[in-house]
Amino acid sequence: MQTLDHVARLPGHDAATHKPVLRNKRLDRALTRVSDAPLRNGNQLTLLHNGSETYTDWLDAIGRAQHWVHLENYIFQDDGIGQRFAEALAERAAAGVRVRVLYDWFGSLDVSGAFWRKLRRSGVDVRAFNPLAVISPFDVIHRDHRKLLAVDGTYASIGGVCIADPWLDTSPVTGLPYRDTAVRVLGPALADIERAFADIWRHNGTPLPPDELVPLNSLSAAGDVLARVVVQEPERMRMLRVFQVMLAAVERRVWIADAYFLAAPILREALLAAARDGIDVRILLPSTNDLPLVGAMSRYGYQPLIEAGVQIWEYAGLMMHAKTTVADGWWSRVGSTNLNITGLQTNWEIDLIAEDQAFGAAMEKMYEHDLAHAREIRLSGKRRLRPRPIRPESRAERQARRHRSDSSVKASLAMARVGAAIQTAGSETLKNNDRTISAVAGAALVSLALLIARWPRLLAWPLALVSGLLGGVSLSRAIARSPNVARGFIHRRAGFRPEAWRLKRRRPRGRNRRLDIG
Protein backbone atom coordinates (compact mmCIF):
# COMPACT_ATOMS: atom_id res chain seq x y z
CA MET A 1 0.00 0.00 0.00
CA GLN A 2 1.56 3.29 -1.04
CA THR A 3 1.42 6.46 1.00
CA LEU A 4 0.76 9.96 -0.26
CA ASP A 5 4.49 10.62 0.11
CA HIS A 6 5.02 8.49 -2.96
CA VAL A 7 2.10 9.51 -5.15
CA ALA A 8 0.55 12.62 -6.64
CA ARG A 9 -2.87 13.18 -8.11
CA LEU A 10 -3.08 13.14 -11.88
CA PRO A 11 -5.74 15.48 -13.31
CA GLY A 12 -8.82 13.56 -14.36
CA HIS A 13 -10.52 10.33 -13.37
CA ASP A 14 -10.38 6.72 -14.43
CA ALA A 15 -13.08 6.27 -17.07
CA ALA A 16 -14.01 2.82 -15.72
CA THR A 17 -13.98 3.40 -11.95
CA HIS A 18 -14.55 7.21 -11.80
CA LYS A 19 -11.87 7.40 -9.11
CA PRO A 20 -9.01 9.94 -9.08
CA VAL A 21 -5.88 8.54 -10.67
CA LEU A 22 -2.71 8.54 -8.55
CA ARG A 23 0.64 8.99 -10.27
CA ASN A 24 3.47 7.14 -8.67
CA LYS A 25 6.60 9.28 -8.33
CA ARG A 26 8.78 6.18 -8.24
CA LEU A 27 7.23 5.05 -11.52
CA ASP A 28 8.01 8.50 -12.96
CA ARG A 29 11.65 8.14 -12.01
CA ALA A 30 11.84 4.60 -13.39
CA LEU A 31 10.33 5.60 -16.73
CA THR A 32 12.62 8.61 -17.01
CA ARG A 33 15.70 6.49 -16.35
CA VAL A 34 14.89 3.64 -18.73
CA SER A 35 13.65 5.92 -21.52
CA ASP A 36 16.29 8.64 -21.18
CA ALA A 37 13.39 11.00 -21.89
CA PRO A 38 12.33 13.71 -19.41
CA LEU A 39 8.63 14.25 -18.72
CA ARG A 40 7.58 17.69 -19.99
CA ASN A 41 4.41 19.53 -19.01
CA GLY A 42 2.36 22.02 -21.01
CA ASN A 43 1.81 20.12 -24.27
CA GLN A 44 -1.16 20.00 -26.60
CA LEU A 45 -1.65 16.67 -28.38
CA THR A 46 -4.06 15.83 -31.21
CA LEU A 47 -4.60 12.33 -32.60
CA LEU A 48 -4.40 12.04 -36.39
CA HIS A 49 -6.32 9.06 -37.79
CA ASN A 50 -4.99 7.29 -40.88
CA GLY A 51 -3.16 8.71 -43.85
CA SER A 52 -5.91 11.11 -44.94
CA GLU A 53 -5.98 13.15 -41.69
CA THR A 54 -2.23 12.97 -41.26
CA TYR A 55 -1.41 14.15 -44.78
CA THR A 56 -3.85 17.07 -44.51
CA ASP A 57 -2.29 18.17 -41.22
CA TRP A 58 1.28 17.75 -42.49
CA LEU A 59 0.67 19.61 -45.78
CA ASP A 60 -1.05 22.47 -43.94
CA ALA A 61 1.92 22.77 -41.58
CA ILE A 62 4.38 22.75 -44.49
CA GLY A 63 2.35 25.40 -46.28
CA ARG A 64 2.58 27.72 -43.22
CA ALA A 65 6.35 27.30 -42.81
CA GLN A 66 8.33 30.55 -42.60
CA HIS A 67 11.79 29.43 -41.46
CA TRP A 68 12.38 25.69 -41.86
CA VAL A 69 10.80 22.31 -42.59
CA HIS A 70 12.35 19.10 -41.22
CA LEU A 71 10.85 15.97 -42.78
CA GLU A 72 12.08 12.46 -41.97
CA ASN A 73 10.35 9.32 -43.24
CA TYR A 74 11.13 5.67 -43.81
CA ILE A 75 9.18 5.53 -47.09
CA PHE A 76 8.81 8.54 -49.41
CA GLN A 77 7.36 7.26 -52.69
CA ASP A 78 7.24 8.89 -56.10
CA ASP A 79 3.46 8.44 -56.46
CA GLY A 80 0.36 10.61 -56.09
CA ILE A 81 0.79 11.65 -52.46
CA GLY A 82 4.58 11.71 -52.83
CA GLN A 83 4.27 14.22 -55.68
CA ARG A 84 1.95 16.39 -53.57
CA PHE A 85 4.55 16.51 -50.81
CA ALA A 86 7.37 17.16 -53.30
CA GLU A 87 5.45 20.11 -54.78
CA ALA A 88 4.65 21.53 -51.33
CA LEU A 89 8.27 21.23 -50.22
CA ALA A 90 9.58 22.77 -53.47
CA GLU A 91 7.15 25.69 -53.14
CA ARG A 92 8.39 26.48 -49.63
CA ALA A 93 12.02 26.18 -50.74
CA ALA A 94 11.33 28.65 -53.57
CA ALA A 95 9.89 31.04 -50.96
CA GLY A 96 13.19 31.03 -49.06
CA VAL A 97 12.28 28.46 -46.40
CA ARG A 98 15.06 25.99 -45.52
CA VAL A 99 13.62 22.59 -46.38
CA ARG A 100 15.42 19.41 -45.32
CA VAL A 101 14.31 15.86 -46.18
CA LEU A 102 15.82 12.65 -44.80
CA TYR A 103 14.53 9.39 -46.33
CA ASP A 104 15.65 5.85 -45.60
CA TRP A 105 17.71 4.30 -48.38
CA PHE A 106 16.17 0.85 -47.97
CA GLY A 107 12.59 1.97 -47.36
CA SER A 108 12.62 4.11 -50.51
CA LEU A 109 14.88 1.80 -52.49
CA ASP A 110 12.74 1.72 -55.64
CA VAL A 111 12.32 5.50 -55.94
CA SER A 112 14.23 6.74 -58.98
CA GLY A 113 17.19 9.05 -58.61
CA ALA A 114 15.43 11.49 -60.92
CA PHE A 115 12.81 12.15 -58.23
CA TRP A 116 15.44 13.16 -55.66
CA ARG A 117 17.47 15.17 -58.21
CA LYS A 118 14.40 17.18 -59.14
CA LEU A 119 13.68 17.85 -55.47
CA ARG A 120 17.28 18.98 -54.93
CA ARG A 121 17.16 21.27 -57.99
CA SER A 122 14.11 22.95 -56.46
CA GLY A 123 16.21 23.95 -53.44
CA VAL A 124 15.39 21.10 -51.03
CA ASP A 125 18.29 19.63 -49.03
CA VAL A 126 17.75 15.86 -49.49
CA ARG A 127 19.76 13.10 -47.80
CA ALA A 128 19.49 9.30 -47.90
CA PHE A 129 19.93 7.53 -44.58
CA ASN A 130 22.53 4.75 -44.41
CA PRO A 131 22.92 3.67 -48.05
CA LEU A 132 24.67 0.35 -48.60
CA ALA A 133 28.45 0.73 -48.26
CA VAL A 134 31.05 -1.91 -49.18
CA ILE A 135 33.27 -0.95 -46.25
CA SER A 136 30.47 -1.64 -43.70
CA PRO A 137 27.92 -4.00 -45.30
CA PHE A 138 26.44 -5.20 -41.99
CA ASP A 139 25.35 -1.68 -41.04
CA VAL A 140 22.54 -2.09 -43.56
CA ILE A 141 20.33 -3.59 -40.81
CA HIS A 142 20.25 -0.21 -39.07
CA ARG A 143 17.32 1.58 -40.70
CA ASP A 144 15.71 4.95 -40.06
CA HIS A 145 12.13 3.82 -39.44
CA ARG A 146 10.90 7.17 -38.09
CA LYS A 147 8.02 9.22 -39.48
CA LEU A 148 8.57 12.81 -38.36
CA LEU A 149 7.68 16.34 -39.42
CA ALA A 150 8.84 19.47 -37.57
CA VAL A 151 8.20 23.04 -38.73
CA ASP A 152 9.63 26.34 -37.45
CA GLY A 153 9.93 25.10 -33.87
CA THR A 154 6.17 25.57 -33.52
CA TYR A 155 4.73 22.32 -34.94
CA ALA A 156 5.74 18.67 -34.87
CA SER A 157 4.13 15.32 -35.63
CA ILE A 158 5.25 11.69 -35.32
CA GLY A 159 3.55 8.33 -35.81
CA GLY A 160 3.44 5.37 -38.17
CA VAL A 161 2.37 7.04 -41.43
CA CYS A 162 4.69 6.85 -44.43
CA ILE A 163 4.41 9.02 -47.54
CA ALA A 164 2.90 6.59 -50.06
CA ASP A 165 -0.46 6.03 -51.75
CA PRO A 166 -1.35 2.78 -49.92
CA TRP A 167 -1.98 4.85 -46.77
CA LEU A 168 -4.97 6.39 -48.60
CA ASP A 169 -6.50 3.05 -49.63
CA THR A 170 -9.82 1.70 -48.38
CA SER A 171 -11.23 -1.79 -48.73
CA PRO A 172 -13.78 -2.03 -51.57
CA VAL A 173 -15.60 -4.74 -49.56
CA THR A 174 -15.71 -3.41 -46.00
CA GLY A 175 -14.97 0.26 -46.67
CA LEU A 176 -12.36 0.16 -43.89
CA PRO A 177 -9.22 2.27 -44.36
CA TYR A 178 -5.57 1.35 -44.33
CA ARG A 179 -5.32 1.93 -40.59
CA ASP A 180 -2.59 4.05 -38.99
CA THR A 181 -2.13 6.70 -36.29
CA ALA A 182 -0.01 9.81 -35.83
CA VAL A 183 -0.06 12.63 -33.29
CA ARG A 184 0.32 16.39 -33.60
CA VAL A 185 2.54 17.88 -30.88
CA LEU A 186 2.56 21.51 -29.74
CA GLY A 187 4.46 22.71 -26.69
CA PRO A 188 7.73 21.87 -24.87
CA ALA A 189 7.93 18.22 -26.08
CA LEU A 190 8.27 19.60 -29.60
CA ALA A 191 11.86 20.63 -28.81
CA ASP A 192 12.76 16.97 -28.11
CA ILE A 193 11.40 15.98 -31.53
CA GLU A 194 13.40 18.74 -33.23
CA ARG A 195 16.51 17.64 -31.34
CA ALA A 196 15.98 14.02 -32.46
CA PHE A 197 15.92 15.17 -36.09
CA ALA A 198 19.02 17.31 -35.58
CA ASP A 199 20.93 14.34 -34.13
CA ILE A 200 20.17 11.95 -36.99
CA TRP A 201 20.73 14.70 -39.58
CA ARG A 202 24.21 15.23 -38.12
CA HIS A 203 24.94 11.49 -38.54
CA ASN A 204 24.41 11.86 -42.28
CA GLY A 205 26.51 14.91 -43.04
CA THR A 206 26.84 18.57 -42.11
CA PRO A 207 24.90 19.42 -38.92
CA LEU A 208 21.97 21.83 -38.85
CA PRO A 209 22.90 25.48 -38.45
CA PRO A 210 22.55 26.82 -34.88
CA ASP A 211 19.43 28.87 -35.63
CA GLU A 212 17.56 25.66 -36.58
CA LEU A 213 18.28 24.02 -33.20
CA VAL A 214 15.37 24.53 -30.80
CA PRO A 215 16.81 24.81 -27.26
CA LEU A 216 15.34 22.33 -24.80
CA ASN A 217 13.05 23.88 -22.16
CA SER A 218 12.71 26.97 -24.38
CA LEU A 219 9.11 26.57 -25.58
CA SER A 220 6.13 27.97 -23.72
CA ALA A 221 3.13 25.86 -22.75
CA ALA A 222 0.51 25.12 -25.39
CA GLY A 223 -1.72 22.89 -23.21
CA ASP A 224 -1.64 20.87 -20.01
CA VAL A 225 -0.59 17.40 -21.16
CA LEU A 226 2.44 15.65 -19.65
CA ALA A 227 4.50 13.94 -22.36
CA ARG A 228 7.93 12.48 -23.04
CA VAL A 229 9.59 11.74 -26.41
CA VAL A 230 11.44 8.41 -26.47
CA VAL A 231 14.20 8.42 -29.10
CA GLN A 232 15.25 4.90 -30.05
CA GLU A 233 18.70 4.23 -31.50
CA PRO A 234 20.24 0.86 -32.50
CA GLU A 235 21.12 -1.34 -29.52
CA ARG A 236 19.67 1.14 -26.98
CA MET A 237 16.38 -0.75 -26.58
CA ARG A 238 14.76 2.16 -24.74
CA MET A 239 11.20 1.28 -25.74
CA LEU A 240 11.71 -2.34 -24.68
CA ARG A 241 12.76 -1.17 -21.22
CA VAL A 242 9.83 1.25 -21.08
CA PHE A 243 7.41 -1.58 -21.86
CA GLN A 244 8.93 -3.75 -19.15
CA VAL A 245 8.42 -1.04 -16.54
CA MET A 246 4.92 -0.20 -17.76
CA LEU A 247 3.77 -3.84 -17.80
CA ALA A 248 5.15 -4.35 -14.30
CA ALA A 249 3.24 -1.31 -13.01
CA VAL A 250 -0.08 -1.55 -14.89
CA GLU A 251 -3.05 -2.14 -12.58
CA ARG A 252 -6.14 -2.72 -14.71
CA ARG A 253 -5.71 -2.83 -18.47
CA VAL A 254 -3.24 -2.42 -21.33
CA TRP A 255 -4.35 -2.31 -24.96
CA ILE A 256 -1.81 -2.57 -27.77
CA ALA A 257 -2.07 -2.10 -31.54
CA ASP A 258 0.90 -3.25 -33.59
CA ALA A 259 1.70 -3.95 -37.21
CA TYR A 260 4.24 -6.79 -36.99
CA PHE A 261 3.97 -8.22 -33.52
CA LEU A 262 6.58 -10.86 -32.80
CA ALA A 263 7.92 -9.70 -29.48
CA ALA A 264 11.24 -10.45 -27.86
CA PRO A 265 10.96 -13.24 -25.25
CA ILE A 266 11.37 -10.82 -22.34
CA LEU A 267 8.47 -8.67 -23.59
CA ARG A 268 6.30 -11.70 -24.30
CA GLU A 269 6.92 -12.98 -20.76
CA ALA A 270 5.89 -9.60 -19.34
CA LEU A 271 2.63 -9.74 -21.30
CA LEU A 272 1.96 -13.30 -20.13
CA ALA A 273 2.65 -12.36 -16.51
CA ALA A 274 0.32 -9.35 -16.69
CA ALA A 275 -2.50 -11.41 -18.21
CA ARG A 276 -2.12 -14.18 -15.60
CA ASP A 277 -2.32 -11.50 -12.90
CA GLY A 278 -5.77 -10.48 -14.11
CA ILE A 279 -4.78 -7.49 -16.23
CA ASP A 280 -7.01 -6.85 -19.26
CA VAL A 281 -4.39 -7.35 -22.01
CA ARG A 282 -5.58 -6.85 -25.59
CA ILE A 283 -3.47 -6.90 -28.75
CA LEU A 284 -4.87 -5.67 -32.07
CA LEU A 285 -2.97 -6.90 -35.14
CA PRO A 286 -3.45 -6.93 -38.92
CA SER A 287 -4.93 -9.88 -40.73
CA THR A 288 -2.78 -8.90 -43.73
CA ASN A 289 0.30 -11.03 -44.30
CA ASP A 290 2.69 -10.03 -47.05
CA LEU A 291 4.65 -13.27 -46.77
CA PRO A 292 2.36 -16.27 -46.11
CA LEU A 293 5.09 -18.34 -44.44
CA VAL A 294 6.13 -15.56 -42.08
CA GLY A 295 2.49 -14.74 -41.41
CA ALA A 296 1.84 -18.35 -40.45
CA MET A 297 4.86 -18.35 -38.14
CA SER A 298 3.67 -15.17 -36.44
CA ARG A 299 0.32 -16.79 -35.65
CA TYR A 300 2.09 -19.67 -33.91
CA GLY A 301 2.76 -17.23 -31.11
CA TYR A 302 -0.95 -16.62 -30.48
CA GLN A 303 -1.71 -19.81 -28.54
CA PRO A 304 0.38 -19.28 -25.38
CA LEU A 305 -0.84 -15.70 -25.18
CA ILE A 306 -4.50 -16.68 -25.49
CA GLU A 307 -4.06 -19.49 -22.98
CA ALA A 308 -2.67 -16.96 -20.49
CA GLY A 309 -5.70 -14.70 -20.95
CA VAL A 310 -4.47 -12.25 -23.57
CA GLN A 311 -7.20 -11.20 -26.04
CA ILE A 312 -5.95 -11.07 -29.65
CA TRP A 313 -7.88 -9.36 -32.43
CA GLU A 314 -7.20 -9.00 -36.15
CA TYR A 315 -8.28 -5.88 -38.02
CA ALA A 316 -10.69 -6.60 -40.88
CA GLY A 317 -9.50 -3.75 -43.10
CA LEU A 318 -6.63 -3.65 -45.56
CA MET A 319 -3.91 -3.20 -42.95
CA MET A 320 -3.39 -2.35 -39.27
CA HIS A 321 -0.17 -0.36 -39.37
CA ALA A 322 -0.58 1.68 -36.15
CA LYS A 323 1.92 1.39 -33.30
CA THR A 324 -0.06 2.50 -30.24
CA THR A 325 -0.59 1.54 -26.59
CA VAL A 326 -2.93 2.75 -23.85
CA ALA A 327 -2.65 1.56 -20.24
CA ASP A 328 -5.05 2.19 -17.33
CA GLY A 329 -6.69 4.99 -19.28
CA TRP A 330 -3.91 7.55 -18.67
CA TRP A 331 -0.61 6.19 -20.10
CA SER A 332 -0.50 6.29 -23.91
CA ARG A 333 2.02 5.76 -26.69
CA VAL A 334 1.95 6.79 -30.36
CA GLY A 335 5.00 6.31 -32.54
CA SER A 336 6.94 4.33 -35.12
CA THR A 337 8.22 1.37 -33.06
CA ASN A 338 6.93 -2.09 -33.92
CA LEU A 339 7.17 -4.62 -31.10
CA ASN A 340 9.73 -6.88 -32.77
CA ILE A 341 13.50 -7.17 -32.97
CA THR A 342 13.92 -4.58 -35.73
CA GLY A 343 11.79 -1.98 -33.96
CA LEU A 344 13.11 -2.59 -30.47
CA GLN A 345 16.79 -3.21 -31.25
CA THR A 346 18.17 -2.39 -34.71
CA ASN A 347 16.19 0.61 -36.02
CA TRP A 348 16.15 4.32 -35.34
CA GLU A 349 12.63 5.00 -34.01
CA ILE A 350 10.70 7.73 -32.19
CA ASP A 351 7.64 7.49 -29.92
CA LEU A 352 5.63 9.93 -27.85
CA ILE A 353 4.36 8.85 -24.44
CA ALA A 354 1.55 10.89 -22.92
CA GLU A 355 0.50 10.74 -19.28
CA ASP A 356 -2.93 12.34 -19.41
CA GLN A 357 -6.45 11.14 -18.70
CA ALA A 358 -8.23 13.01 -21.49
CA PHE A 359 -5.74 11.87 -24.13
CA GLY A 360 -5.92 8.33 -22.76
CA ALA A 361 -9.71 8.40 -23.07
CA ALA A 362 -9.38 9.43 -26.73
CA MET A 363 -6.91 6.59 -27.28
CA GLU A 364 -9.27 4.04 -25.71
CA LYS A 365 -12.19 5.33 -27.79
CA MET A 366 -10.10 4.92 -30.95
CA TYR A 367 -9.08 1.42 -29.88
CA GLU A 368 -12.66 0.34 -29.19
CA HIS A 369 -13.70 1.67 -32.60
CA ASP A 370 -11.00 -0.49 -34.21
CA LEU A 371 -12.11 -3.54 -32.22
CA ALA A 372 -15.62 -3.06 -33.60
CA HIS A 373 -14.09 -3.71 -37.03
CA ALA A 374 -11.89 -6.64 -36.03
CA ARG A 375 -12.24 -10.37 -35.41
CA GLU A 376 -11.27 -11.87 -32.09
CA ILE A 377 -8.98 -14.89 -32.27
CA ARG A 378 -9.95 -17.76 -29.97
CA LEU A 379 -8.81 -21.33 -29.44
CA SER A 380 -11.15 -23.83 -31.10
CA GLY A 381 -11.11 -27.26 -32.69
CA LYS A 382 -12.33 -30.78 -32.01
CA ARG A 383 -9.09 -32.75 -31.79
CA ARG A 384 -6.64 -29.94 -31.21
CA LEU A 385 -7.19 -26.38 -30.07
CA ARG A 386 -5.84 -23.82 -32.48
CA PRO A 387 -6.18 -20.03 -32.74
CA ARG A 388 -8.98 -19.16 -35.16
CA PRO A 389 -11.04 -16.03 -35.81
CA ILE A 390 -14.57 -16.18 -34.42
CA ARG A 391 -15.84 -15.13 -37.86
CA PRO A 392 -14.00 -16.52 -40.89
CA GLU A 393 -12.82 -14.06 -43.49
CA SER A 394 -14.78 -14.05 -46.74
CA ARG A 395 -13.14 -14.68 -50.08
CA ALA A 396 -14.00 -11.14 -51.20
CA GLU A 397 -12.22 -9.72 -48.14
CA ARG A 398 -9.14 -11.81 -48.84
CA GLN A 399 -9.05 -10.54 -52.42
CA ALA A 400 -9.53 -6.95 -51.26
CA ARG A 401 -6.57 -7.23 -48.92
CA ARG A 402 -4.34 -7.91 -51.89
CA HIS A 403 -4.43 -4.20 -52.65
CA ARG A 404 -1.73 -2.52 -54.68
CA SER A 405 1.40 -1.53 -52.81
CA ASP A 406 4.80 -0.41 -53.93
CA SER A 407 7.69 -2.86 -53.86
CA SER A 408 9.53 -0.86 -51.19
CA VAL A 409 6.48 -1.07 -48.93
CA LYS A 410 6.37 -4.84 -49.40
CA ALA A 411 10.11 -5.12 -48.82
CA SER A 412 9.96 -3.12 -45.60
CA LEU A 413 7.11 -5.21 -44.26
CA ALA A 414 8.94 -8.40 -45.15
CA MET A 415 12.14 -7.21 -43.46
CA ALA A 416 10.29 -6.36 -40.26
CA ARG A 417 8.50 -9.69 -40.07
CA VAL A 418 11.47 -11.86 -40.95
CA GLY A 419 13.64 -10.17 -38.34
CA ALA A 420 10.93 -10.53 -35.73
CA ALA A 421 10.33 -14.16 -36.60
CA ILE A 422 13.99 -14.99 -36.09
CA GLN A 423 13.91 -13.40 -32.64
CA THR A 424 10.71 -15.14 -31.60
CA ALA A 425 11.94 -18.57 -32.61
CA GLY A 426 14.08 -18.77 -29.49
CA SER A 427 11.35 -18.01 -26.92
CA GLU A 428 10.63 -20.71 -24.35
CA THR A 429 7.07 -19.48 -24.01
CA LEU A 430 6.14 -20.86 -27.42
CA LYS A 431 6.52 -24.43 -26.12
CA ASN A 432 4.86 -26.74 -28.63
CA ASN A 433 4.66 -24.00 -31.21
CA ASP A 434 8.41 -23.56 -30.99
CA ARG A 435 8.85 -27.26 -31.70
CA THR A 436 6.81 -26.90 -34.88
CA ILE A 437 8.90 -23.95 -36.04
CA SER A 438 12.11 -25.78 -35.12
CA ALA A 439 10.94 -28.85 -37.02
CA VAL A 440 10.29 -26.78 -40.16
CA ALA A 441 13.66 -25.05 -39.85
CA GLY A 442 15.40 -28.39 -39.18
CA ALA A 443 13.80 -30.03 -42.20
CA ALA A 444 14.88 -27.11 -44.37
CA LEU A 445 18.48 -27.37 -43.14
CA VAL A 446 18.59 -31.13 -43.70
CA SER A 447 17.24 -30.66 -47.23
CA LEU A 448 19.88 -28.02 -47.88
CA ALA A 449 22.61 -30.34 -46.57
CA LEU A 450 21.48 -33.14 -48.90
CA LEU A 451 21.45 -30.74 -51.83
CA ILE A 452 24.99 -29.59 -51.08
CA ALA A 453 26.20 -33.19 -50.64
CA ARG A 454 24.77 -34.07 -54.05
CA TRP A 455 25.94 -30.89 -55.84
CA PRO A 456 28.83 -29.43 -53.80
CA ARG A 457 29.51 -26.69 -56.33
CA LEU A 458 26.07 -25.32 -55.51
CA LEU A 459 27.56 -23.99 -52.28
CA ALA A 460 31.25 -23.71 -53.14
CA TRP A 461 31.09 -20.75 -55.52
CA PRO A 462 28.68 -18.58 -53.49
CA LEU A 463 30.64 -19.39 -50.31
CA ALA A 464 33.92 -18.45 -51.96
CA LEU A 465 32.42 -15.21 -53.25
CA VAL A 466 30.99 -14.22 -49.86
CA SER A 467 34.18 -15.22 -48.01
CA GLY A 468 36.32 -13.24 -50.41
CA LEU A 469 34.09 -10.17 -50.09
CA LEU A 470 34.00 -10.31 -46.30
CA GLY A 471 37.71 -11.00 -46.07
CA GLY A 472 38.52 -8.06 -48.33
CA VAL A 473 36.25 -5.76 -46.35
CA SER A 474 37.79 -6.86 -43.05
CA LEU A 475 41.35 -6.34 -44.33
CA SER A 476 40.47 -2.93 -45.76
CA ARG A 477 38.88 -1.80 -42.51
CA ALA A 478 41.81 -3.13 -40.44
CA ILE A 479 44.36 -1.28 -42.58
CA ALA A 480 42.27 1.91 -42.61
CA ARG A 481 41.95 1.86 -38.82
CA SER A 482 45.64 1.05 -38.20
CA PRO A 483 47.70 3.71 -40.03
CA ASN A 484 50.92 2.69 -38.28
CA VAL A 485 50.61 -0.87 -39.57
CA ALA A 486 49.81 0.35 -43.04
CA ARG A 487 52.73 2.79 -42.97
CA GLY A 488 55.16 0.09 -41.80
CA PHE A 489 54.08 -2.21 -44.59
CA ILE A 490 54.44 0.48 -47.22
CA HIS A 491 57.77 1.76 -45.89
CA ARG A 492 59.36 -1.58 -46.73
CA ARG A 493 58.65 -0.94 -50.38
CA ALA A 494 61.71 0.55 -52.08
CA GLY A 495 61.61 4.22 -52.92
CA PHE A 496 58.35 4.98 -51.10
CA ARG A 497 57.98 8.41 -49.47
CA PRO A 498 55.57 8.61 -46.45
CA GLU A 499 54.83 12.27 -47.18
CA ALA A 500 53.53 11.42 -50.62
CA TRP A 501 51.39 8.62 -49.21
CA ARG A 502 49.77 11.03 -46.76
CA LEU A 503 49.07 13.51 -49.53
CA LYS A 504 47.34 10.86 -51.63
CA ARG A 505 44.90 9.72 -48.96
CA ARG A 506 41.42 10.35 -50.19
CA ARG A 507 39.03 12.39 -48.12
CA PRO A 508 35.23 12.21 -48.30
CA ARG A 509 33.81 14.87 -50.55
CA GLY A 510 30.47 16.62 -50.46
CA ARG A 511 28.22 17.49 -47.60
CA ASN A 512 26.17 14.30 -48.03
CA ARG A 513 29.05 11.93 -47.33
CA ARG A 514 28.05 8.91 -45.29
CA LEU A 515 29.23 8.43 -41.72
CA ASP A 516 29.13 5.12 -39.83
CA ILE A 517 26.37 5.23 -37.21
CA GLY A 518 26.40 1.66 -35.92
Image: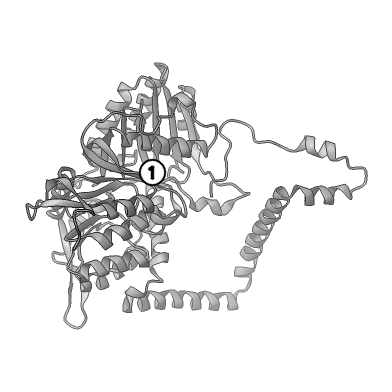
Disc 1 is placed on an element classified as loop
Can residue 117 be seen here? Answer: yes
Can residue 320 be seen here? Answer: no
Depth check, front residue: 445 or 432: 432
Q: In which quarter of the image is residue 153?
A: top left
Q: Residue at x 42, y 36 (%)?
A: 195
Q: Position of residue 289 (x, y in %)?
A: 31, 58
Q: Compared to 400, does 267 lie above or below?
A: below
Q: Which residue is drawn at 25% across and 35% down?
A: 42
Horizontal side, residue 304 vs residue 198: left or right:
left
In this picture the colour scheme is one colour
Q: Quadrant of residue 55?
A: top left
Q: Quadrant of the N terminus?
A: bottom left
Q: Residue furthest right?
A: 494
Depth check, front residue: 272 or 398: 272
Horizontal side, residue 152 vs residue 329: left or right:
right
Horizontal side, residue 177 vs residue 79: left or right:
left
Q: In which quarter of the image is residue 437?
A: bottom left
Q: Where is residue 40 in the image (x, y as percent from the top left)?
A: 30, 39
Q: Compared to 225, does 124 lie above or below?
A: above
Q: Which residue is drawn at 25% across and 41% down?
A: 226
Q: Residue furthest bottom?
A: 383
Residue type (three-letter) at the residue carrying disc 1: Arg
Q: Position of residue 337 (x, y in %)?
A: 35, 51
Residue that mark 1 sits on? 146
Q: Compared to 98, does 416 lie above or below?
A: below
Q: Which residue lies furthest to the left in this view?
A: 18
Q: How crowded is mark 1: few (under 14 residues within 10 Å), some or many (20 or more)?
A: many
Depth check, front residue: 101 or 236: 236
